[in-house]
Amino acid sequence: MRYLVAGAAGFVGSHLCDRLIAEGHEVCAVDNFITGAERNIAHLKSRPRFQFIHHDVIQPIHVDGPLDYVLNLASPASPKDYLDHPVETLRVGSEGTRNLLELALEKDAGFLLTSTSECYGDPLEHPQKETYWGNVNPIGPRSCYDESKRFAEAVTMAYHRTHGVRTTIARIFNTYGPRMHLNDGRIVPAFIDQALRNAPMTVFGTGAQTRSFCYVSDLVDGLLRLAHSSERLPVNLGNPVELTVLEFAERIRVLTGATSQLVFEPLPQDDPQRRRPDITKANQVLGWQPQVGLDEGLTYTIEYFRVPV
């Protein structure tokens, strides 16, 4: 098959390209490098089934030849990145998603939108099911990301209902693994970076807030299962094992052998207090559940960052 992957040089996008190439598919990779890194896909550029297009999807995109699937992973995804690029984040979620939907319509291709658990905001329902409409502050600093993804879901469903595009929507929960940016503000790379330097580990708030972390290979597997499915409504993809931020900091401290102390800073505005996916639907519809345990995944990730990248 031939896939277009938008956001191909990003953390998840590059791992998705690896998986597709390993399975023998053709990949047309698209990125503008606003947050993606060329090094993430450098090892693929010599592959005969890999094509790279430097392009910003907020502009219409034209691709020669047929496409079987359009996979939309184009968006800043870490708090640091989308707070640094709020307008670009809103535009890629709205204009970018529509342009990629137009491409899928033109090519009669399947379409996958990578949405986010941020659609649930600071949730009042726990764990979060796909039927929950969320608790989002539409004018807060995080709204550029939350609302861009909520709009992206709406326009995706509109193209399905109006034009019959074969759309799928993944709501991704916290994901980690090699190729994350150490300075992107997310918990995993921040803690690993600080622990490997034996620097103080920064905990926001009291550390009692919870997160659930999924290793990137599990997420990629879920995304491809979903893309090939007939499920048109959103599906949660994440690991339901829930830890407090303090528990997670301690786990990384043990695995790295760090002597880092914990330091506490104020919690950012609208930061969710609890976050855990209900993955019943993913299990029933896709036969999917995470396979990589937290210690195993963290060990892979820590070893990646021990070597200068």
Image: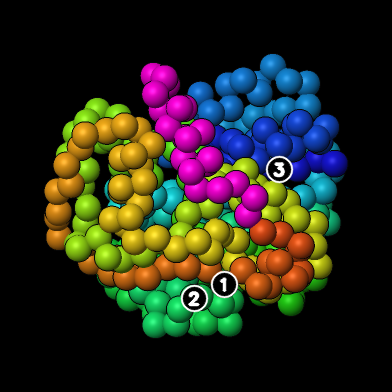
**Which residue does the numbered mark 1 point to in the structure image?**
278
117 falls in the magenta region:
no
In the picture, measured across the screen, residue 24 lies left or right of residue 153, that is right
Residue 302 in the image: above or below residue 6 = above
Nearest the eye: 126 or 76 = 126
**Which residue does the numbered mark 3 point to in the structure image?**
4
Q: Earlier in the sequence, mark 2 or mark 1?
A: 2
Which type of secondary structure does the marked residue at label 2 adopt? loop
- What separation in Å lies between label 3 and label 1 (alpha carbons)? 29 Å
In the picture, measured across the screen, residue 100 lies left or right of residue 144, that is right
Kind of residue sitting beneath label 2: Pro
Q: Position of residue 280 (x, y in %)?
A: 65, 73
Q: Position of residue 19 (x, y in %)?
A: 71, 37
298 falls in the magenta region:
yes
The stretch in magenta equals 290-309
Q: Position of residue 97 (x, y in %)?
A: 58, 58
